[in-house]
C-alpha cells in the first residue's frame, strides 16, 4: 500500500462502497421473516473463513492439515456443549433442524422398538417432526398427537394423560415457529423424569425442537430435563445447512445413514468444518445477546401487535398473548388472502410470511393455525412477522404505514370482506 | 406464450414469482367492483370457489339483449395474486372488441386465461383459475332469467 496509485485506488473503492451503501439504504429491505431464516453473523463468517482454503483438511486425516481441522471441530463441539450444559460427546453435528429431528425420532424409535411402539407429540410440531412421526406410523408405530388450547399451549396434564407403558418417546417443541407460543418443556421434562424414576424404566425419553427458541430462551439441557434437543444454525445467524442434535450420554440411536465412523458412528460423512465452526460461533453470539435482545424485542413485538389490532378492523392475534417468543407476531386479517398481502408488502420492500396454502406446495393452510381452532379462511388470511437483530422501531412504523392500505385495497377486491 | 414460470421470470428485472402480466393485473386490477352500486343494473351474477380452499370469486355480467354479447364484466375475488390477476384479465378477454357472445364465453377455457397471463406456476393452475366457472354460472343464471 506504499504506492500512491494503490492508495488512490483504495480511496476510490471506499467511496464507491459508501455510495453503494447509501443507494441501498434508500430502498432498504425490511426483513421480518427471521423465523424462516437469518442472515449470517459477520463474526461467524469470519470464524469460518480459514476453514475453506487455509485449513481445508479432512478431520479424519492424520497429517497436520487434518489434525488442525479436527481440532476446530472438537473445539466447536466443546463450546456448544458448554452453552447447553452438556458433555462434548453428547453433541452430534448435523445438516440442520430437519436432520436432527429425524435422527432423534427415527433413530431412537428404530433402536428401541422392542421396548414399545408408542410415541407422543403435538399437532403443531414442525413438519420435520411430523414427517418423521408419519414415517414411523408406516413402520408400525402408534403416535398420539396432542392438540393445543386456542393459544397454542400444550399442558403437562395432556402429556401425562397420553402416557402408556409402551410409550418410548415424547417430542414437544420448545416454541412454535408459526405462532410463537412457548411450550412448558421444562415441566414436561420434569414429569417424564419422575415417571421414569417411578417405573424404573429408561423410557420414555424426551425430545424438544428448540430451533426457534435459540437466542431467546434458556437452553441448558438439565434445566429442560430433555434427552434430545435440536438446534438449527440458519435460524440463529449461523450458516445454512448446519445444526446439532444433543443426545444424552448412553442413549442408543440407530443411524439414518451408513458409512464412516464420524460423529461416533451416528452420522457418517466428512464433517462440514467451516459450517461447524460457524455454527458454534453463531450460538455463542446468540447466547451472549440473548437477554438484551429479548428485552429489546418484547416491547417492539407488543407495539406492533397493539398498533395493528387497533388500526386494522377485523384483525386477530394468533398464538398466546404473553407466553410467546419475543420476536413473533401472527395475525389474521379477515377477508384477505395471505399470499396477496405478502406480495403487496414485498412490493413495498417488506418481507413477511403467511400461513396461507398459496405459498406452500400443498393446498392446505397452516396445520398450526387449524390446530388452534382457526377456520380455513382465517388460516388463509394470516401473516407472520418475525423480528430480528436488524429490526428497528422505524421498520415497524413503516409496516404500520403500509399495511392498513394494503389490507384496505385487498378488502375492496374481496367478496368476503 | 409458454405457460412456464421461468418465462415469466425472464421478462422482469427484479425476480418475481409470477409473469409481468400477472404482476401488472395484480397490482392494477381492472373492472373490479368498487361499490355495489356499480353492478345494480347488471343482468346476472355467478360465484365459484370457497374461502375454505383459499379462493372465492364473484362475477357480474351485463349482456346486450339483442346481440347476446357480454358488454360488462365486474368481479370480486378473495385469493392469491394469480387468482386476482386471472379474474382481472378475464374481465378484459370477455369484454374486448364489443364483447364475447354468451356461446363464446361459455367455452372460455382456463388454458386460454393462463396463456393470456403469460403462464402460471404449475401448482397454481388448478386453484387460481376458477373465474371461467364463475362466469359460466353467471351465464347460466342470465339464460335462466331471460329465456
Image (cartoon, coloured by chain):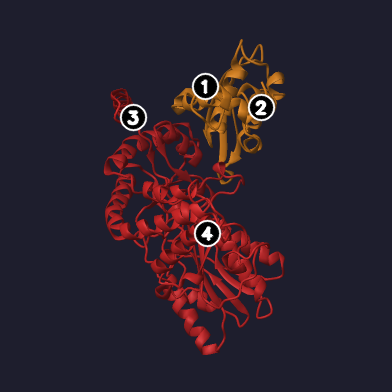
Chain colours: A red, B orange
Quadrant for residue A151, please give it. bottom left
Q: In this view, does A105 lie above or below A374?
A: below
Which tag is nearer the camera, tag 2 or tag 3? 3
Which tag is nearer the camera, tag 2 or tag 4? 2
The answer for which chain carries disc 3 is A
**C-alpha gap between disc 2 and disc 4:** 36 Å
Which tag is nearer the camera, tag 1 or tag 3? 3
Q: Mark 1 points at which residue?
A: B41
**C-alpha gap between disc 1 and disc 3:** 61 Å
Q: Assign a secondary structure to mark 3.
A: helix
The foreground one among A129 and A92 is A92
Q: Name the residue under label 4.
A: A371
Q: Mark 2 points at which residue?
A: B3
Label for residue A17?
Answer: 3
The answer for which chain carries disc 4 is A
Q: Is residue B125 above or below residue B97?
A: below
Amino acid at each position: 500500500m506504499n504506492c500512491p496509485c494503490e492508495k488512490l485506488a483504495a480511496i476510490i473503492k471506499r467511496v464507491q462502497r459508501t455510495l453503494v451503501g447509501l443507494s441501498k439504504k434508500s430502498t432498504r429491505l425490511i426483513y421480518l421473516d427471521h423465523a424462516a431464516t437469518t442472515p449470517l453473523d459477520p463474526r461467524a463468517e469470519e470464524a469460518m473463513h480459514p476453514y475453506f482454503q487455509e485449513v481445508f483438511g479432512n478431520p479424519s486425516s492424520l497429517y497436520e492439515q487434518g489434525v488442525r481441522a479436527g481440532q476446530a471441530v472438537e473445539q466447536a463441539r466443546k463450546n456448544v456443549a458448554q452453552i447447553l450444559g452438556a458433555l462434548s460427546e453428547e453433541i452430534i453435528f448435523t445438516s440442520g433442524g430437519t436432520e436432527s429431528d429425524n435422527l432423534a425420532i427415527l433413530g431412537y424409535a428404530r433402536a428401541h422398538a422392542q421396548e414399545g411402539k408408542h410415541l407422543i407429540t403435538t399437532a403443531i410440531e414442525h413438519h420435520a417432526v411430523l414427517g418423521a412421526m408419519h414415517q414411523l406410523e408406516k413402520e408400525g408405530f402408534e403416535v398420539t398427537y396432542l392438540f393445543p388450547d386456542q393459544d397454542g399451549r400444550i399442558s403437562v396434564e395432556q402429556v401425562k394423560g397420553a402416557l402408556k407403558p409402551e410409550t418410548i418417546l415424547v417430542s414437544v417443541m420448545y416454541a412454535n415457529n408459526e405462532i410463537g407460543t412457548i411450550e412448558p418443556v421444562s415441566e414436561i421434562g420434569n414429569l417424564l423424569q419422575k415417571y421414569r424414576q417411578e417405573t424404573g424404566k429408561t423410557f420414555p425419553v424426551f425430545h424438544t425442537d428448540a430451533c426457534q427458541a435459540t437466542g431467546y430462551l434458556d437452553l441448558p439441557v438439565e434445566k429442560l430435563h430433555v434427552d434430545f434437543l435440536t438446534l438449527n444454525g440458519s435460524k440463529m445467524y449461523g450458516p445454512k445447512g448446519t445444526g446439532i442434535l444433543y443426545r444424552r450420554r448412553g442413549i442408543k440411536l440407530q443411524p439414518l445413514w451408513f458409512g464412516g465412523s464420524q460423529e461416533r458412528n451416528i452420522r457418517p460423512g466428512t464433517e462440514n468444518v467451516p459450517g461447524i465452526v460457524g455454527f458454534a460461533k453463531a450460538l455463542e453470539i446468540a447466547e451472549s445477546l440473548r437477554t438484551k435482545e429479548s428485552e429489546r424485542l418484547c416491547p417492539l413485538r407488543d407495539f406492533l401487535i397493539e398498533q395493528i389490532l387497533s388500526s386494522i378492523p377485523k384483525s386477530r392475534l394468533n398464538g398466546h398473548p404473553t407466553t410467546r417468543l419475543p420476536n413473533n407476531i401472527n395475525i389474521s386479517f379477515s377477508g384477505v388472502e395471505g399470499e396477496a398481502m405478502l406480495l403487496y408488502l414485498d412490493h413495498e420492500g417488506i418481507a413477511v410470511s403467511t400461513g396461507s396454502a398459496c405459498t406452500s406446495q400443498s393446498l392446505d393452510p397452516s396445520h398450526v393455525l387449524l390446530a388452534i381452532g382457526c377456520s380455513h379462511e382465517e388460516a388463509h388470511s394470516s401473516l407472520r412477522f418475525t423480528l430480528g437483530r436488524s429490526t428497528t422501531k422505524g421498520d415497524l412504523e413503516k409496516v404500520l404505514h403500509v399495511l392498513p392500505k394494503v389490507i384496505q385495497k385487498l378488502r375492496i377486491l374481496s367478496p368476503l370482506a | 406464450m409458454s405457460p412456464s414460470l421461468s418465462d415469466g421470470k425472464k421478462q422482469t428485472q427484479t425476480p418475481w414469482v409470477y409473469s409481468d402480466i400477472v404482476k401488472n393485473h395484480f397490482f392494477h386490477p381492472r373492472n373490479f367492483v368498487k361499490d355495489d352500486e356499480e353492478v345494480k343494473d347488471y343482468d346476472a351474477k355467478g360465484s365459484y370457489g370457497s374461502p375454505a380452499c383459499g379462493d372465492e370469486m364473484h362475477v357480474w355480467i351485463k349482456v346486450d339483449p339483442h346481440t347476446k354479447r357480454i358488454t360488462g364484466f365486474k368481479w370480486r375475488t378473495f385469493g392469491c395474486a394469480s387468482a386476482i390477476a386471472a379474474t382481472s384479465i378475464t374481465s378484459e378477454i370477455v369484454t374486448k372488441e364489443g364483447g364475447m357472445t354468451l356461446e363464446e364465453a361459455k367455452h372460455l377455457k382456463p388454458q386460454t386465461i393462463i396463456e393470456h397471463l403469460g403462464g402460471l406456476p404449475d401448482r397454481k393452475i388448478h386453484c387460481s383459475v376458477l373465474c371461467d366457472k364463475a362466469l359460466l354460472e353467471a351465464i347460466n343464471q342470465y339464460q335462466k332469467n331471460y329465456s
